Image: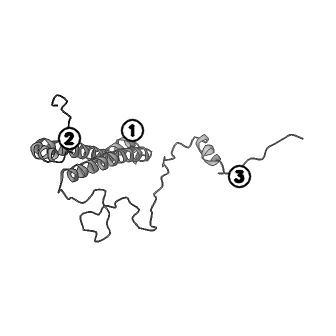
Amino acid sequence: MANVAAAPAAGANGSQAKNAMNTKNFGASFAPGFTINVNAGNKTNTGAPAFNGGGGGHGGSQSLLPPPEFGSPAQVRNYCNTLRAAGVTLSIEVAMAAEILNGVLAAVPDPEGRLGGSRARARKVTRKMQKSADALRDAAKNAAACYSTFQQQYEEEINRVRHRARRPQQPVINWAQQ
């Protein structure tokens, strides 16, 4: 009697996908798996500030940016840094989405059967999404440039306040005076 191991059930270890790839089914499309997480639980503040989009806390819409209150250089810096960080993060995510969309659309057969037609159509569509990613990256650059220009233009006022805010120096002992 031969020692035969029982094969796992179909699909238990991805065997269906492997078998489908081995049957030379080149018309199959690539669709990456992704998950969307929505946290709709307890909405109490746990120390991290939840920024509202300038609505004064009304309406419940949340924003990626702090409220546009510019009463101090620190608030200007915080706003510009938050905008820069959000722009960089969103730029990367949108660029990745454009690449994934390009891959998905390139797998759709061209209705007229043109050679390379499906790739050309996919590039035409995803070019707009890539432009959005580029615009977000430029927004991040401009946010950093905004704070740099603010520092240059208001250097005198910032330094004047910074000088007043320094701690008083410790008294120095004059050893020559006896």
Disc 1 element: loop
Identify which residue, 25 or 146, lies in the foreground: 146
Mark closer to the chain start, 3 or 2: 3
Q: Where is residue 153 drawn, in percent x and y? A: 10, 43
Looking at the image, residue 52 lies above or below residue 26 = below
Mark closer to the chain start, 2 or 1: 1
Q: Amino acid at mark 2?
A: Gln
Instruction: Provide the residue designation for mark 1.
Output: 116
Q: Which of the numbered marks, if any, corresponds to residue 127?
A: none
Q: Which quadrant, please, contains the N terminus?
A: top right
Q: Which of the numbered marks, if any, corresponds to residue 9?
A: 3
Mark nearest the camera among 2 and 1 is 2
Identify which residue, 52 or 123, lies in the foreground: 52
Q: Amino acid at mark 3?
A: Ala
Residue name at image x 20 percent, y 39 percent: 171
Q: Where is residue 29 drawn, in percent x and y? A: 49, 47
